[in-house]
Amino acid sequence: MTFNDIYLLSPEITVVLLAAIVIVVDLFTTNKKIIPIITSLGIILAILLTVTLHVDPDTTTSSKGFFNTFSADMFGLFFKYIILGTVLVVVLYSYEYAEKFNNHQGEYYSLILFSASGMMLLASATELITLYVALELTSLPSAGLVALKRSRNAAEAGIKFLLLSAISSAVLLYGMVLLYGFTGSTYLNEIAAQISRSDLISNPAILLGIILITAGFGFKISAAPFQMWAPDVYEGAPTPITAFLSVASKAAGFALAIRIFYPVFVGTEISIEWGQIIAILSAISMSLGNLIAIKQKNIKRLLAYSTVAQAGYIMVGLAAMSVPGTEYDSGASGILFYLAGYAMTNLTAFGIIIFVCSKTENYSISKFSNLLKISPVLAISMTLAMISLIGIPPTVGFIGKVYLFSAAMDSGLAWLAIFGVINSVVSAYYYLNIVKIMFMGSPEEETDKEVESIPHTIGYTAVILSAAATFAFGLFPSPIIDIANKAIQSII
């Protein structure tokens, strides 16, 4: 490993070392409040290192390192911003929440950091073995985090997540093995070159490999019909971890998909068949997620099915970029923009859920009854989050959906864009129901009795900033759009 390798991997190395430091500090201190402070400062350092790589002109010409298995290109850096930003907000939300774990706060924060390091590596890996190792580094700590509450629901959710994650990883690995077996390489650029200049594209084994990789990827992003783990895991996991999985894990999953599919399959003959599969999965995810979410009374389960629908919206961009003769980067950059906006929106929603529900661990939607009277700021912030998830202006969610659906229209997938618009209208029913309960009350008046006041903590500030970003980038989306376009250009 050269100095350049260390430099390019510096954000990941920082996060891993930070996880080790957190464990050591936890062993030798009785003041557990220092642990989230150290974690926050370390994450900020990793963000600064990511910014350094971003502005360094040398990384644009020599971004590959560690035997060309890793690339610190703009694409990887974009996802590191999302992942590190998500981790920072989750840690801020956990300042008070993690006190529930008493002597296990070190494990709590270190597992978050180890999982985040895997997600960051996943976004920058350019070789199949490295991708798989990063995927396991992402999944295994996440399973531990889900079961950390030591309740029956948490244990069930943790086991379910671990088993299904192992199965999906095995399916994904077998797909990778087929690609390697018929191309003779584990490097994505060499696999792309082999497929584009040979008759491998019509080989049934290659087609099977693509299907298996798509199935494994579908689990990671909780897309239908691979979403069976999401409701129980979202409900059983600690709420900050639910936020972490809903945002960072989904971002890492789409980073994996674009890393593999964009250079290897987009622009080849097989992209048509693959795009049709993705379009069908997108339509199923949107419909299934929204229809089941309508019936939910638990806010965490509602957002679990919501994230299935959101995965369907994002997959519209994958389908659009697979159509030959179109601007591939339009759909791909739309995915990146939507993921950034989705991170702001979902972190806002889950932050408010923590404040309203975590004291009693009662996550009934009726707990939000008359939240406007108790905390107008949080009620307005939650409203912004809900209308952003629907895709109503002037929020970042609206711009994201316009971006994705326009890419679908330009690619000749008008039916999928129309399907997305219809599903957005359907989703308004359960999102706006939460807004109605906050402003007009609910028949089950639980909030007035159980939530007397909202403390103005550092997590409260993080909620406000996330909500402000949801609104601000809806009005001024250009900075994210520019970075997203540069990120996609870096892997073309």
Image (cartoon, rainbow, N blue to C red):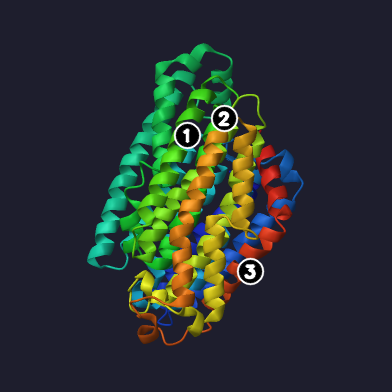
Q: In which quarter of the image is residue 111?
A: bottom left
Separation of residues labelled 3 and 2 (CA atoms) = 34 Å
**Residue highlighted by disc 3:** 468
Query: Residue 322 shows which numbered tag?
Result: 2
Separation of residues labelled 1 and 2 (CA atoms) = 9 Å
Q: Earlier in the sequence, mark 3 or mark 2?
A: 2
Q: Is residue 44 above or below residue 290?
A: below
Most distant residue in the right direction? 57
**Residue highlighted by disc 1:** 278
Residue visible at 45% across and 45% down?
A: 286
Identity of the amino acid at label 1? Answer: Ile
Residue visible at 33% across and 74% down?
A: 361
Most distant residue in the top direction? 199
- SS at circle 1: helix
Image quarter hosting the C terminus: top right
- SS at circle 2: loop
Toward the viewer: 63 or 166? 166
Give percent across and percent down for residue 419.
Answer: 50, 41
Q: Which of marks 1 and 2 is nearer the N terminus?
A: 1
Give percent across and percent down for residue 57.
Answer: 77, 46
Image quarter hosting the N terminus: top right
Give percent across and percent down for residue 188.
Answer: 55, 30
Identity of the amino acid at label 3? Answer: Ala
